[in-house]
Image (cartoon, helix red, strand yellow):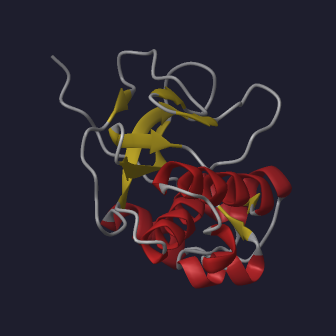
Amino acid sequence: MATSLSSGANDESIAKQCFEWVRDNIMHSYDYKMNPVTCKASDVLRHRTGYCYAKSHLLVALLRSNSIPAGLCYQRISVGEHGAPFCLHGLTAVHLKNYGWYRIDPRGNKEGVNAQFVPPVEQLAFPTVQQEEADLPEIWSDPHPLVSAVLEEFDSYDAVYENLPDMHLLLK
């Protein structure tokens, strides 16, 4: 799969192809009410479904297979429109030669969600606007343990939704 997405002339065009392929071809588990719950990139690719976290795992694997540095990063966002409950939202960070680290969101677009690859501007699925929301600055080489625990413990998309991982922030 990674090789078929590497027809670009540079890291930016390859990263864009990988991003758009995952965003548009892997169905978001909750949006499409799809099982099984996936975590590993190979399972996401095989079953063509995953939560934002799993879709990011696949995107990171595809980018790394094309020798493009990539890692996982997270936002803390409201599950609903306003306020609690909150959850982590999975993103991908890719290192582009012309821009440095750049975050992209392969979650999948739908009404009200329009994630795009337009460096150097980040166009993520969800803005962080509430005090309890945040763009977490870390770039992880492996999935956050809270995320892995939820994806490995629950076996249906609705059970994952009822137990979305979260971490509390220290607010100023």
Residue at 74% of width from left, 54% of height from top?
A: 30
**Residue closest to the eye, 24 or 13:** 13
Residue at 41% of width from left, 36% of height from top?
A: 76
Q: Quadrant of residue 74?
A: top left
**Residue closest to the eye, 128 or 95:** 95
**Residue closest to the eye, 152 or 56:** 56
On the picture, is 50 further left or further right than 34?
left
On screen, 65 above or below 21? below
Image quadrant for the C terminus?
top left
**Residue closest to the eye, 10 or 1:** 10
Residue at 76% of width from left, 25% of height from top?
A: 112
On the picture, is 104 further left or further right than 1?
left
Instruction: Give the percent coordinates (x, y) of residue 22.
Output: 68, 60
On the picture, is 57 further left or further right than 115?
left
How many numbered discs sit on the rendered protein? 0
Residue at 61% of width from left, 53% of height from top?
A: 19
Q: Quadrant of residue 14?
A: bottom right
Instruction: Give the percent coordinates (x, y) of residue 143.
Output: 37, 66
On screen, 115 above or below 13? above
Instruction: Give the percent coordinates (x, y) of residue 2.
Output: 60, 76
On the picture, is 99 further left or further right than 109?
left
Image quadrant for the N terminus?
bottom right
Instruction: Give the percent coordinates (x, y) of residue 8.
Output: 61, 59
Q: Quadrant of residue 62?
A: bottom right
